[in-house]
Amino acid sequence: MTEQGLSHARLNRDVLRTLTETGPVYWWALGLALAVSLVCFFLPWGYQLVAGVGVAGMNRPLVWGMYLSNFIFWIGLSHSGTLLSAVLHITGSPWRRAIYRSAEAMTLFSLMVAVLFVFVHVGRPWNIYWSLPYPNQRELWPNFRSPLLFDVTAITTYLTASFTFLFMGAMPDLAAARDGTTGWRKTLYTWLALGWRGTEREWHHLGWAYTFFAVLIIPLAVSVHSIVSWDFALSTVPGFHQTVFAPYFVVGAIYSGTAGIVTVMFLLRKLYHFEAYITEDHFDKLGRLLLVLSLLWTYINGLELFTGWYSGSSAELETLRYKLTGLYAPLYWAMLLFCAALPLVLTSSRVRHSFRSMLAISVLVNIGMYFERFLIIATSLPRKFLPNTWRDYLPTWVELAILLGSLAIFVSLFLIFVKLVPSLSIYEVKETLPHGKGADGEGPP
Amino acid sequence: MSVLGLFARPETALAAAKALTDAGHAVSLMSPYPIEGAAEALRLPRSPIRRYTLFGGLLGFSCGFGLAVFSATRHLLPTGGRPIIPLPPFLLIGYELTILFGVLATLLGFLICARLPAWRERPYASETAVDKYGVLLECGADGEAEAETRLRAAGAEAIRRGGELMPPEEGT
């Protein structure tokens, strides 16, 4: 065997090992995540279904609450995976190869969790089919002028496209898993790989199809979070009614999604010993991206404050006052600290090359971004036009538990994913290995 | 019938596949990752997937915009003098379905062009998903020996015929 052969074989072994070798830590983590999902998400949701949506803290004028903050947060978190993967594929960035599979999975699972919140929020999820266009005896059709219907269309498209993009990109590796496993896994991968053999015809058409997917997905991802922003911006509520909301949401989504990728990459690298494949260089590149996004996000945040103030409208000014000094002011200033000030340390190359620092920053950025999503709702709706309707919003234990439970569902889905699908793109990492170099024990360049 | 030659290096496999194609043989190249120049060497035509994508996109736009118009005209809902068929929101629905149908049509196009799914038995060597490069040479029932000779002459280090991986000959 050549040195190259050893290195390629090692890559296959390293990745397939993550599917077949399962330690007790994994089972404990999965068990805990599933238990928390049940106790904190499904049981409280069941309680809400029985007792009514009144057990959540939503009431007039706050008919939207934490559930929709969670919806925006999870949609936002979904935004870097597929989008980043598609952009880096189009631009031919080689550092994408080691990280994109997990990032795309993150997109898919974040979207699934986000969609769950639509069901939780509506109170009577068994009527959700009313939002779908289908012939019915009442001859009632959904109102396609509503941004909520834009949401249904955009998120369905995004979920379908993200799943397809992930599946197509994983097909060659599913074939490698088919060849490298036995038992029920072999049967599963035989079906999933669709008979892939890696012929030049298959690679040729996959390359074209994958590029078309990437081209289609980039505008789609931008449109999805723009549309989510219009759920707010197309209303006349002070604090919502801003033209900057679409770019604000898109930048925020890519920002939190990129931070999410850093967190996931850190964990994958540590738990699966992918040190040879996910390197300091990846974290450096992601750190640079985070820095640029934090500056963009900070600028748009400033713009949001400025346009509110410059409007001179008393309702807008009251909303601003409430946001900056009201009940949730500590969350607002914490958000600025985590998302605007703290990421400035990423100007330092030493910080970008430190795995632990990058993990800490990525987690804090996402905490800040959750605050941002929460504040959009919790500081705008309590200060609508009529002062006699003003009321502070406090989430109940049901909403807080469901938030925690959603995180556990995401973790559960991801843990199941890493045991079923190669979490690192074998064939694309192989492309970075120089022929005849990279002896066993060495990592890719 | 076919004979599969396994090569250690991509450039050798590509050169062999190109030479055999130029000599008029039906050849397939198998590799663990896409090899640059393989499509040109094996004279693959430009992928027709783009036509599927275009057709899917156009169909999606028509369906999305048509659905919005159809549903708005089934039950008229005049709101503040605004048009019954407003362009900005309806174009948005058309846009989203353009992408949805475009993605699904691209997937369909890929499956048709790559002739997948194919769960039936076909010549294959699992090493080509790891670190080997395979050249599959189609031949007649009595042409296996000749095909094997051609592949060995082109640098194949092992031959797979009839599901058996034959040991390499001395000196190859």
Image (cartoon, coloured by chain):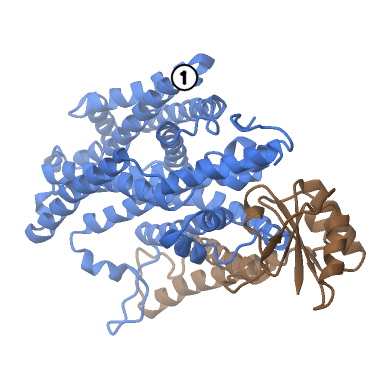
Chain colours: A blue, B brown
Residue closer to the observer: A97 or A6: A6
User: Which residue is more in the foreground, B149 or A69?
Assistant: B149
Extreme residue toward the left, this view: A51
Residue at the image point whose x is 23% and y is 24% from the top: A330
Mark 1 belongs to chain: A
Answer with the quarter of the image where residue A269 lies: top left
Is residue A293 found left or right of A410 in the rendered image? right
Question: How many numbered discs?
Answer: 1
Q: Is residue A34 above or below residue A302?
A: below
Q: Is residue A62 visible?
A: no
Q: On the rendered structure, is A399 left or right of A310?
A: left
Q: What residue did someone put label 1 on?
A: A354
Circle 1 residues within 10 Å: few <14, some 14–19, many ≥20: few
Residue B99: percent from left, percent from top: 54, 61
Closest to the observer, A123 or A177: A177
**On screen, A140 above or below A230?**
below
In the displayed orientation, state which residue is furthest to the right: B23
Q: In what element is the residue under mark 1?
A: loop
